[in-house]
Amino acid sequence: DPALAPKGKHVLHAYTLEPFSNWAQYEAGVRPRGSREQYEAQKCASAEPLYAALRRIIPDLDQRVEVADIGTPLTHKRYLRRHRGTYGPAIVAGKDMFPGPATPIAGLYRVGDSVVPGIGVPAVVASGMLCANALVSPAENDSLLRELNYH
């Protein structure tokens, strides 16, 4: 999407999954004195393997990065109000499945990173599309788009 960055620039969103327990010591109210520097150092150390992988694809990555914002489970907890900084659903791989949009409550549907097809911006968008498709037939969807002059 060209609107996300100035002309000639790009946005790259990359992430790894980290357990909350690696970060809980830095949580507000628990944080020991002087730990801000330790927290920042741990953020950089945790991000380094990801940067190393990206450098394999973009060798001059370090010279090209103009803004970097490293988040942690504490970032998700604070700004996204996610329990223990979760990213996506709390499911066990190979044991549980992502739920679909339907809920036991009539007329209430769910979308986002905790339902099919999962985490990441494209998947979240797709979850909204899947939910919309569950509400109206393809023919009704086509009719609505034509009515909005969007087809």
Image: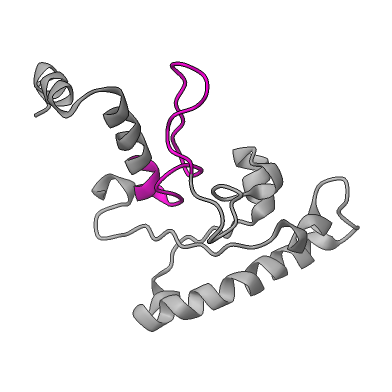
Which region shows up in magenta?
Answer: 99-125
Most frequent secondary structure within the magenta stretch: loop
* Nearer-the-camera pick, 93 or 148: 93
Figure check: 129 above or below 148 = below
The image quarter containing residue 64 is bottom left
What is the x, y in percent for residue 28?
82, 46
The image quarter containing residue 132 is top left
How many numbered badges does the structure rendering display?
0
Figure check: 3 above or below 38 = above
What color scheme is it? one colour
What is the x, y in percent for residue 89?
56, 47
> Is residue 59 in view?
no
Figure check: 59 above or below 3 = below
* Nearer-the-camera pick, 42 or 18: 18
Residue positioned 65% across, 74% down in the render: 45
Left or right of residue 64, residue 86 in this image: right
* Nearer-the-camera pick, 37 or 57: 57
Q: Residue furthest right?
A: 33
Residue positioned 20% across, 25% down in the render: 137
The image quarter containing residue 19 is bottom right
* Nearer-the-camera pick, 130 or 13: 130
> Is residue 67 in view?
yes
Left or right of residue 8, residue 13 in this image: right
Residue positioned 56% across, 57% down in the render: 95
Position of the C terminus, as image quadrant, is: top left
Residue positioned 42% across, 44% down in the render: 116
Q: Is residue 123 magenta?
A: yes
